[in-house]
Image (tube, rainbow, N blue to C red):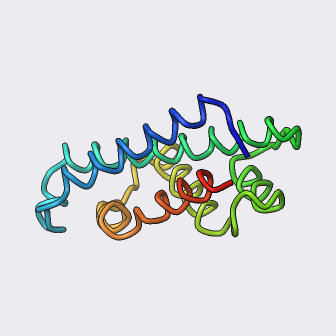
Amino acid sequence: MEYSAVVHRKLALLDKYLVQLQSQLENVNIEAFKNDWVLQRMAERVLQVMVEIVVDIAERIIAFKDAGPVATAAEAMEKLAELGVIKSAASYTNMVRFRNLIVHQYEEIDPAIVFDIAKNHLNAFRQFRDEIDLA
């Protein structure tokens, strides 16, 4: 299915942020990350924006398919799965939960969790991009 140019621009922006985040953390270990508040805030913000991009794309596709609106970002992920745009909403709803944690419980963010996501779980963003590109 052909989506709007806005969706394609957002997918390109998602790729850009993935590359930038990986580049900034490439040679950083957990101890260095825990001791560098600038890296922590950068990673938190980039991950938050990447999730926002995923949610925005989901909401645009739902609107494009005239299948909305949805009340929450998690519902948007479920709706994409119902529509067959993505295989499963599970990893994407986890993204939304993480985004909610950063936004609403920002004073309690464990740097180890942010580091783990930034170093070991970025493939979920690539998977989303690939599923949308194939849709």
Given residues 111 and 133, the one toward you in this image is 133
Q: Residue at 71% of width from left, 55% of height from top?
A: 77
Given residues 64 and 21, the one toward you in this image is 64
Q: Is residue 24 above or below residue 9?
A: below
| Residue 31 placement (x, y as % from top left) | 13, 67
Q: Residue at 38% of width from left, 56% of height from top?
A: 109
Q: Is residue 25 above or below residue 4?
A: below
- In the shown orientation, is residue 130 left or right of residue 89? left
Q: Residue at 30% of width from left, 65% of height from top?
A: 119
Q: Place residue 64 in its image quadrant.
A: top right
- In the shown orientation, is residue 126 left or right of residue 94? left
| Residue 88 placement (x, y as % from top left) | 69, 69
- In the shown orientation, is residue 124 left or right of residue 131? left
- In the shown orientation, is residue 114 left or right of residue 102? left
| Residue 79 placement (x, y as % from top left) | 80, 54
Q: Residue at 29% of width from left, 49% of height from top?
A: 19
Quadrant showing the C terminus: bottom right
Q: How many marks?
A: 0
| Residue 42 placement (x, y as % from top left) | 28, 43
